[in-house]
Image (cartoon, rainbow, N blue to C red):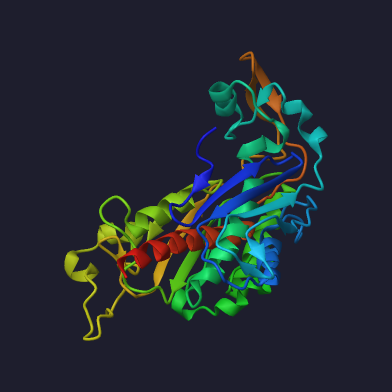
Amino acid sequence: MAGNSFGKLFNVTTFGESHGEAIGGVIDGCLPNITLDLEAIQNEMNRRKPGQSSIVTQRKEPDTVRFLSGVFEGKTTGTPIGFIIENSNQKSKDYSHLKDTYRPSHADYVYDKKYGHRDYRGGGRSSARETACRVVAGAIAKQMLGSIEINAFTSSVGDIFIDKPYQDLDFSKIESNAVRCPDAVTADKMITRIKEIKKQGDTIGGTITCVLKNVPVGLGEPAFDKLHAELGKAMLSINAVKGFEYGSGFCGAKMKGSEHNDIFNPDGTTKTNLSGGIQGGISNGMDIYFRVAFKPVATIMQPQESIDAQGNTITLQGKGRHDPCVVPRAVPIVEAMAALVLADYFLLNKMYK
């Protein structure tokens, strides 16, 4: 199986399955002599881990990360950083009924056809549990990036949206509620909606907005390695993601050039930022902001028609512990993937100096 690595200079390769012994990874390219805040890394893991509130899956995993190499006396050595996260709360029996059946909108069918042998327990390698490894790598990338600020938050659940621009939001309030929405009134509506959906045995989707501040001018490469292209790839690699837009996004398609152009100030900043902080695929020093769309979780606690490995029509109903809405737990994953992209381009820019 190829495709388990991300990044060129700052690179992470992950391994493991949802119900295997452990998951983990190897990070290569991290600069030496960075004093790691291990508590901050674990805090990022705690933001993603299951069982943290009543509106997420109740699988109980401590998600404690253990470093095996590349860190000595609290500092990075510049050698590959190996780490492991043990799976301590597997319930493989919850998936025994899936051994020879395919869940709608999951990877079961395509994995079986592509590889001829699949780990059906929780989706195996296709499970979103793999993203815990990305959060570890992203947490280290954040510390290498220093003053760059990365803040993601839930901007919608179903048809409930924040009706304010991100500039009017207090990012310090993101962690003040279970849904990770910095607007308290909207957050209450989102939480109520998720609980209603959960009682129905159903799931719901939503969007995450991410804002990158203090990004220096010059990150990004023409022509195929544009900064926004790599951010798009990073976000679309996250489980359940169905769309990515940055800056004005699809709304920009409705505008005239005279409305959309960002006029320069004498210092090189711009009066507006419909470009989303990226021009010609290269960061321009303004805030980079983008939105990521997540589909409803495919496992629902309602009967659905499907097929088995022999092509017979069957009725299938979800079992086990699943998120009614993946968006709140995906917030730190979006931040982590953004950090990995910026770390890669940060190292690439050092080649020019």
Asked if 186 appears above or below 119 in the picture, the reply is below
Q: Please give left or right for residue 58 compared with residue 8 in the image.
A: right
Q: Please give left or right for residue 8 compared with residue 78 in the image.
A: left
Q: Nearer the viewer, residue 103 or 236?
A: 236
Residue 10 appears in the figure: yes
The residue positioned farthest toward the bottom in the image shown: 266
Task: Give the quarter of the figure containing the C terminus.
Answer: bottom left
Q: Please give left or right for residue 216 compared with residue 101 in the image.
A: left
What residue sits 59% from the left and 69% below the top?
181
Q: Nearer the viewer, residue 271 or 231?
A: 231
What residue sits 47% from the left and 48% below the top?
236
Which percent across, then down, holds residue 293? 49, 53
Q: Please give left or right for residue 195 compared with residue 349 in the image.
A: right
Q: How many marks?
A: 0
What residue sits 17% from the left and 70% below the top?
258
Q: Nearer the viewer, residue 18 or 65?
A: 65
Which percent across, then down, holds residue 173? 61, 77
Which percent across, then down, holds residue 310? 64, 13
Q: Quadrant of residue 134?
A: bottom right
Q: Quadrant of residue 270?
A: bottom left
